Image: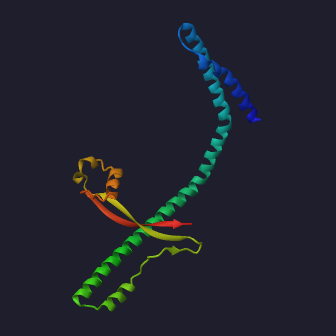
Amino acid sequence: MQNKKIIELEKEVDIVLEPVTTLTIKGKQDLQEASEILTNLNRYKDRVKEERERITKPLNEALKAARDMFRPVEARLDESISSLRGAMTVYQTEQDKVIAIATAKAMADIESGKVDINEAVTALSEIERVDAPIATSNKGSVSFKLTKKFEVMDVTMLPPQYLLANDVMIRASMKEGVELSGVRYFSEKTPINYR
C-alpha cells in the first residue's frame, strides 16, 4: 500500500521536474515561470517529507523509547565495568612495580654477594604474578596490554604549540617517541576482555 503512494508521488514529481532541465531564464516571464516551478517543487518536497515522517516519526519514537528503556541498566553496567577495569589496572600496574623492585633488589643482592642466584630465583618465584591471559569459567579471558599514558604536570614547560595541552598533539608526539618537558609519561596495563 505504502509503495503505491511513493510510486504515484514519484510520477507526479517527474512531471513537475520536466521543465527544470529545459528552462532558461532570460527575462521577467521566464523568472515568473521559474518561480512557479520552484513553488511547486518545494510543495512536492514538503509532501515527500510529510510522507516520510509519517513512517519515520513513529519509528524514531519507538527507537528513543527502546533506548530510554535500556539506558539505566546500560549505565549501571558501564559504571561497574569501568570501576572493575580501573581496580584491575591499579592492581596489575602496582604488581608490576613490586616485581620490578624485587628483581632489582635480587640483582643487587646477587652482585653484592648477599645471596646466590638460586636463592634470588626462589625469592622471585614466590612473588604473585599474572603473565598469561586469565581464563574465565564462561569461556572468556582477560589479558593486560601495556598502554602508554601521560599527564601534564607543568603547562608552562610545554613548547608553545602545546600550551593548550592539546591531548591529540601530545599523544601524536608520544607515539613518535618525542617526550615533552612538563609532561609525565607512564604506562598502565589495561584489561582487554574477549568474549
Pick the quarter of the image with the N terminus. Answer: top right
Residue occupying image coordinates x 65% and y 38%: 56
Looking at the image, residue 147 sits to the left or right of residue 51; the answer is left
Looking at the image, residue 123 sits to the left or right of residue 112; the answer is right
User: Furthest-right residue in view?
Assistant: 1
Q: How many marks?
A: 0
Up-down: is 179 above or below 127?
above
Residue occupying image coordinates x 67% and y 40%: 58
Position in image of residue 54 (x %, y %):
68, 34
Looking at the image, residue 163 sits to the left or right of residue 21; the answer is left
Position in image of residue 151 (x %, y %):
32, 58
Image quadrant assignment for residue 107 = bottom left
Position in image of residue 75 (x %, y %):
53, 56
For this rendering, which residue is in front, 60 or 77? Answer: 60
Residue occupying image coordinates x 41% and y 72%: 92
Residue occupying image coordinates x 39% and y 83%: 127
Q: Which colour scheme is used?
A: rainbow
Image quadrant assignment for residue 60 = top right
User: Furthest-top residue in view?
Assistant: 28
Up-down: is 41 above or below 66?
above
Pick the quarter of the image with the C terminus. Answer: bottom right
Position in image of residue 87 (x %, y %):
44, 68
For this rendering, which residue is in front, 12 or 115? Answer: 12
